[in-house]
Image (spheres, grey):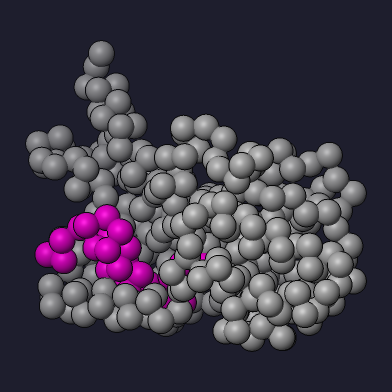
Amino acid sequence: MNEREFLAGRFEAHRGRLQAVAYRMLGSHSEAEDAVQEAWLRLSRADPGDVRNLAGWLTTVVGRVCLDMLRSRGSRREEPLEARLPDPVVSPLDGRGAPPDPEQAALVADSVGLALLVVLESLTPAERLAFVLHDMFAVPYEEIAPLLGRSTAAARQLASRARRRVRGCAPSPDRDMARQREVVEAFVAAAHEGDFAALVAVLDPDVVLRAEAGALVGGGWAEVRGARNVARQALAFRRASPSTGRLALVNGMVGVVNTVHGRPSAVMSFTVSGGRVAGIDILADPDRLAGLDLAAFEG
């Protein structure tokens, strides 16, 4: 085995973690893969003697690449990014409401709910980097600060500001999969039957529904708040676009993949908190759905 093959093997051992860092930073599968590939290119050009802690070196490189990618999305480098739903991680759900195999179970244990990723999308690039690297991957502020060109104290302040926003906007989900499934099935049944009262009963009074590209009348980005408003919108959507819903695992939580004539038309992520639906995130952009692996839900 030559030196490059040895280095590639060491890199592959860290790929899963790097992919997780990049996905949480970018909310995009393809962009996360690009960021990880760029980290490999930089490693392949680096002097091995300069890389003492490979895991830490790669994590900070991916963080720097993601920061540059986030900043390039908007016209103003430190402004929150345009509202968008992150790419969901979708897989089938077995009959018990549990992931079907040990590998999938590991994914669930390490998953980040779509609702949390939506909140991360609202942060500035610097806030997101500080929060993701420190709070999710335990990178010290002393290592984060140089990536931002800030002091250690400033990096700590950015993460603290992001943390307050996350706690205020992302409800803490119920982790009982069976309970999640019960609540989501109740929502689906009430929507299918056109039962407004039953829908309101299963929704948290402060529920937030977010949808991107075609999920609501007018398309694009839409946000609806409050149980009665969300119930009305759910019934209107059901009447306008009859579909078949199949339970799925969406970012580690019970969700639904809607299909029309056997083809996926929307991915719905539910945040169940306190036994009620506290958040619904719907991705119905045909172009973005085409980029997801939804073959298991076709037909």
Residue placed at 86% from the left, 67% from the top? 193
Q: Is residue 122 visible?
A: yes
Q: Is residue 287 above or below residue 121?
A: above
Locate residue 227 relative to residue 178 in the image: left or right.
right
Can residue 121 be seen here? The reply is no
Quadrant housing residue 189: bottom right
Please provide percent x and percent y for residue 169: 45, 79
Image quadrant in which you'd find residue 148? bottom left
Asked whether, in this view, residue 249 is left or right of residue 43, the answer is right
Q: Quadrant of the N terminus?
A: top left
In the rendered image, the vertical position of residue 89 relative to residue 212, given as above or below: above
**Which one is nearer the viewer's eye here, 248 or 5?**
248
Q: Main structural element of the magenta stretch: helix, strand or loop?
A: helix
The percent coordinates of residue 232 (x first, y second) are: 78, 82
Whether residue 125 is in magenta: the answer is yes
123 lies left or right of 181: left
- Residue visible at 20% across and 58% down? 139
Q: Is residue 109 depicted above or below 120 in this figure? A: above
The residue under the point 66% across, 83% down is 227
State which region is magenta: 115-142
Residue 134: image location, x then y, percent? 24, 63
User: How many numbered markers are drawn?
Assistant: 0
The quadrant holding residue 83 is: bottom right
Q: Quadrant where the C terminus lies?
A: top right
At a point 59% along the width and 71% down the height, the residue shown is 276
